[in-house]
Image (cartoon, rainbow, N blue to C red):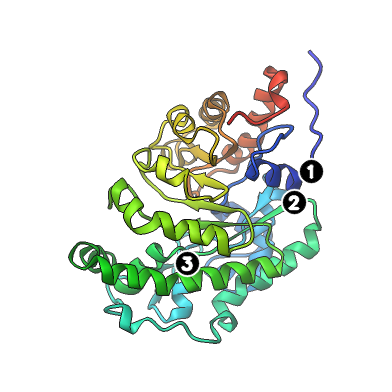
Amino acid sequence: MPPFVETMKPRERVLAALARQPVDRPPVCNPTNVATVDLMDMVDSYFPDANRDPELNARLAITGHTELGFDSVAPYFTIIQESSALGCEMQWEGKDNWPTVRMSKPIWKGPQDIKIPADILKHRDMMAITDSIKILRQELGNDVAIVGKTMGPWTLAYHVFGVEKFLLMSIDDPDKTMECMDKLKELSVLFGNAQLDAGADALTFPDHATGDLVSGAYYKRFLLELHQEMAERIKAPLILHICGSTLDRLDYIAQSNMAAFHFDSKNDPAKAMEIAKGRIALVGNLNNPSTLYARGPKEVREEVFRCMDAGVDMIAPECAIPLATKLENLLEIPRAVRAWMQQHPKNGATIKS
């Protein structure tokens, strides 16, 4: 059997997959984060500074391609840049822990309090991302896809109001909840377009209406039309990210007009593809804690093959990976994709959708 031959550059492959167009193979593209402590040691760029300094950020982000062989880089490692800029109290942690928002100390009580500073894009933690994207575009040219990230309003609401208070608001006063969404979405658009202006090719759009917290009916009620609006106003492919079990809302998500959905390992990939029916690309859904963190390359390859067998459009970990993930497991992901393609040469013409 002749060897599988790649015919596309990484950026070309990612953008084609997001458009559900023919590719030589599914891209390996984690739209959240693949930074690890080992990679931090390799390039002398550590948390928390790598989240706040654009040069350190770019130095760490680029390893997703140069060291791991992924088709994309993702410089926004966390979910807290906007919340920090809005004034949330932060816990920045050390190199082996994620920075977090102290959601026990919310900064606002309701929609009347929402104020987005006119100069928010000049805040240090916003510029860390936009300036990093400029550096990465300069270094990578047009060969590798750069995936930025802008938080959706549901996620931002958790941070500024606190999870419990916001979810109670959604029950007690749905109109007030929608007013919050309408105000917070403007920051999603503002920061998203700023990253595109800096050179990003696509954006992850985390909006954590997860199955662990809210129902599929909630997604339809509060977020479907809003996400359709975001897909219209942000002029680049959007990759919606929601953790947890989401098969109950995947039919609605497929109507969001977003380019792709980054989905969790709690969802069977074959069932997810069946529901999506080619209306939206699927990205995922390799298990983080049980496989990438705790097992070895053999188990990683098995999960990659499961996704490839199902026809998943882009292969990736289910979310931001544990910071102590072994590099050998991450290196196995693109190797396994190529190995599957070698075994299925006729599948290289198009993505299964």
Q: Amino acid at mark 2?
A: Val
Mark 3: amino acid: Gly
Q: Which mark is residue 9?
A: 1
Identify the image quadrant of residue 153: bottom left
> Which residue, given by chain and number where applicable, does mark 2 sit on?
144
Q: Is residue 141 above or below residue 90?
A: above
Measured as percent of width and height from the top left, residue 307 is found at: 53, 30
Q: Is residue 212 visible in the rendered structure shown here?
A: no
Under mark 1, the amino acid is: Lys
- Towards the viewer: 338 or 48: 338
Residue at the (55%, 76%) spot, across then down: 125
Please name the residue that numbered disc 3 is placed on. Answer: 94
Looking at the picture, tell me which residue is in the foreground, 218 or 144: 218
Vertical position of residue 47 compared to residue 315: above or below = below
The answer to whether the residues at label 2 and label 1 have Cβ atoms under 8 Å apart is yes
Q: Is residue 132 left or right of residue 261?
A: right
Farthest-out residue, top: 1
